[in-house]
Amino acid sequence: MSASIEKIEKEFLEYVKKISAYGEALSLIYWDMRTGAPKKGIERRSEVVGMLSSEVFKMSTSEDMAAFIANLSSDAARHELSDTTNKMVEECKKEYERNKKIPAEEYKEFVVLQSKAESVWEDAREASDFAMFQPYLEKIVAYTRKFLGYWGYEGNPYNTLLDMYEPGLTVEVLDQVFGELRERIVPLVKAISKSENKPETSFLYKRFPKEKQKEFSLEILKQLGYDFEAGRLDQTVHPFATGLNVGDVRITTRYDEHDFRGAIFGTIHECGHAIYEQNISKDLTGTLLDDGTSMGIHESQSLFFENFIGRNKSFWKKQFPVLKQHAPGQFDHVELDDFYRAINESKPSLIRVEADELTYSLHIMIRYEIEKALFNNELEVKDLPGVWNKKYQEYLGIKPENDASGVLQDVHWSGGSFGYFPSYALGYMYAAQLKHAMLKDLPGFDQLLEAGNIAPIKKWLNEKVHKFGKTKKPLEILESITGEGLNAKYLIGYLEEKYGSVYQFK
Amino acid sequence: MSASIEKIEKEFLEYVKKISAYGEALSLIYWDMRTGAPKKGIERRSEVVGMLSSEVFKMSTSEDMAAFIANLSSDAARHELSDTTNKMVEECKKEYERNKKIPAEEYKEFVVLQSKAESVWEDAREASDFAMFQPYLEKIVAYTRKFLGYWGYEGNPYNTLLDMYEPGLTVEVLDQVFGELRERIVPLVKAISKSENKPETSFLYKRFPKEKQKEFSLEILKQLGYDFEAGRLDQTVHPFATGLNVGDVRITTRYDEHDFRGAIFGTIHECGHAIYEQNISKDLTGTLLDDGTSMGIHESQSLFFENFIGRNKSFWKKQFPVLKQHAPGQFDHVELDDFYRAINESKPSLIRVEADELTYSLHIMIRYEIEKALFNNELEVKDLPGVWNKKYQEYLGIKPENDASGVLQDVHWSGGSFGYFPSYALGYMYAAQLKHAMLKDLPGFDQLLEAGNIAPIKKWLNEKVHKFGKTKKPLEILESITGEGLNAKYLIGYLEEKYGSVYQFK
């Protein structure tokens, strides 16, 4: 390697390490704020967050960074540098350009607007009054349209937004897979609504003491391969997983004594996210590549654990007796089959975060179609409630009675996070597609679950998905494992078979 | 104010705010590392600590800082600036000079040595072998002697070390107060050893479930005025209090099911530290002055709570029945008087951190005399174990059987923290002196404790000590409250009266 490139690379690695270290400090502060930081300290803590974040932003958009990028992305330099360094430069360049293309003044205005809009959104949702939020959302959309002008796009303006959360994903692909999915799911949802074989679910709501739910959650986490020497479980209002570094990936859950499912399936879901981050290659620490490669792939891991493991009958063959021990009495007279059917009940609902795995994607498609229309100038903000309600009627057969349980339910738009929602549905599709591929290597998947032997499944995911962190793009991972691009048929096949069995269509 | 000074002041305030913010992030990281951070994440977290600390160090010793100090400490500037800004400049200047006087290369070597020495000390203590630690301690002492050469001193070289922890304190003062104290305490300790009225203590060691100890600790914290909206209680091996900001001052405790005293008195002690920091004026946030003014004053607050409140018979008149409720059975047949005598048992012991309030100061004097001799070149490191053991025999009438329970017991010297130990004993003296002054304003002190009405006591301390943070020097606080300087007679009087009563000499 030429001495000059070597020197610049070394400086670049140090520089990025510092950005990454500040990011880790910030992650700890966020975790702490959500897990029990005393409220009187929050105001000052927010200032600390502001100072560290703006330092990270400054470093990512500095002249130093510009020089690193210029010097290290020439063909000659790329040829000399390691794969990892090249990926780091790419990531930094993408971030740099995204931020630098927006005039600083406009970006600042937008940040102020975001924080105002979120608090207005909270009030509007509380009051169930879209009109309160509308002027703010209009401004957020206007800024985002303007930014799209600065950023540019290929094919469709919305592609640029998708790319922020799911690099490489396009409207063209989404239209196709969502179209196929909708075509098969909507009739299935209708058939289930009319089914006379509905599962009995009353036993789900009996009292299950919090401490016992926690014990069972810890037991399940252990069995799933969550590494407690590289993590911990805490309690929060909204469960989440956060990776501070690969040796410290924390999860949280919540406990409802009259519905244990939130704690158990929430814990398994976050466990999937956490196992991803605990198993990213240690060599990527401090490179900014030691993170999940995209929102969709991240979600595919949490959903794989939650649904393909956690809602699988074979899994409960082993775990149902354990659950019975932790919840003395509640399930004594419940058969495994009935338990399995109950935890897989599906019915159309208005609130996305409460939706089951069958109807969930429909909630996402509605948001996707609305966002796509907004940024193709085919829809204006004032028309959102009407369009929202019409689509819920069409796809789910139900209609919100008010804005709070309709168009105002999600926080995302108040922060300008357009393009994010599709990742959730992609997670389902990726997961189903990975499961299909996994079966070729592990045809005894169900038997492994029955034996409580998760290790080979975890190892498969570690080797094929986790360890790469951000060094492989989402579609690269998918294609290298499955030999094809995104394909909805695996999710469709899985859902049709599963819900056919749960509702005893066959 | 002249426009130029105003501008520089504004920049200086922003600059210090950033140093303070990074310090707050560091404090959170330290708290987290001690309260349950997963061990596999620690190595990387230490790098994060290193990066943030070195940023703080860089900022504190930068050319920017030098310019702020130069511009803001002229008489003309001082005259225009607020008191707070003047104090900030003084603090920054002190820190700057301390760090800049040492050649950078030597400081770096010393930091490396410190961290090696601490790990060698751990091994040496484990092996109870001073010879292992000796060469490292010799180097640490040599560096410190050299640094003293750079820093300079007035009167006695050891004064410069004392000043780091207790600004304004001198060997002259310490020799006098420690001399008076020793003269009266040593005979008292001997008399107690021979006393035939020793308290019965066996009931202290009965099983007290951890959960119950925690409940009682929380109850006591509430009664003492610890603000749970500005703090939280966690569990650690070594209890501590840490102020992240005035709205977030956390404490930790430990639970021994066969000796509840560690949890209860430890919690009350840390509560004293925490109440100090929770009540520093909010205006000082982000100025680096929002901290205790010295180690000694800090310790005076924790000891005031632990001993003058927590080991006071009047306090237990109210609290003993509450304790009984939390520890069903254990104290059922114990009278208040017997309980009071038991928790105030005094006997010479080898380990400082386990010493009672009467013998504690003797442990400190031994360390003080050794440190003073070391930095006046009257003693060499190799002679430490012999001198140590001789002094323990002389002051406490007992002699360590090995280095682990003797000269190797404390971590301080491995980190070069010479001058720190005296603060602990000063804490006792300050506390007794403050208590004496407080009685003039609150003659019904004991009645307040009996009524469980701590608020007026806390308010007195808030107004006279806490709110000033670092804006008043320790002796300034002491003198403004008591009208005199450090005086050992109040502690002597308190101890003679108290232990006379506990051991029924009168």
Image (cartoon, coloured by chain):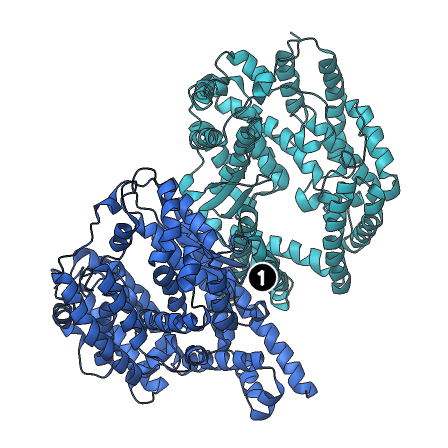
Chain colours: A blue, B cyan
* Residue at x 73%, y 50% (from the top left corner): B119
Position in image of residue B338 (x %, y %): 56, 12
Residue count near mark 1 (Cα–Cα under 10 Å), binned few <14, some 14–19, many ≥20? many
- Residue B124's place in the image compared with A270, above or below, is above
Q: Is residue B395 visible?
A: yes
- Name the foreground residue: B414 vs B325: B325
* Residue at x 25%, y 65% (from the top left corner): A358
| Element under disc 1 | helix
Position in image of residue B204 (x %, y %): 57, 20
Q: Quadrant of the C terminus of chain B?
A: top right
Q: Quadrant of residue B156?
A: top right
Residue tagged by mark 1?
A: B48
Position in image of residue B321 (x %, y %): 44, 18
Q: Which residue type carries mark 1?
A: Val
Q: Is residue A323 left or right of residue B116?
A: left
- Name the foreground residue: B451 vs A365: A365
Position in image of residue A495 (x %, y %): 27, 68
Q: Is residue B443 visible?
A: no
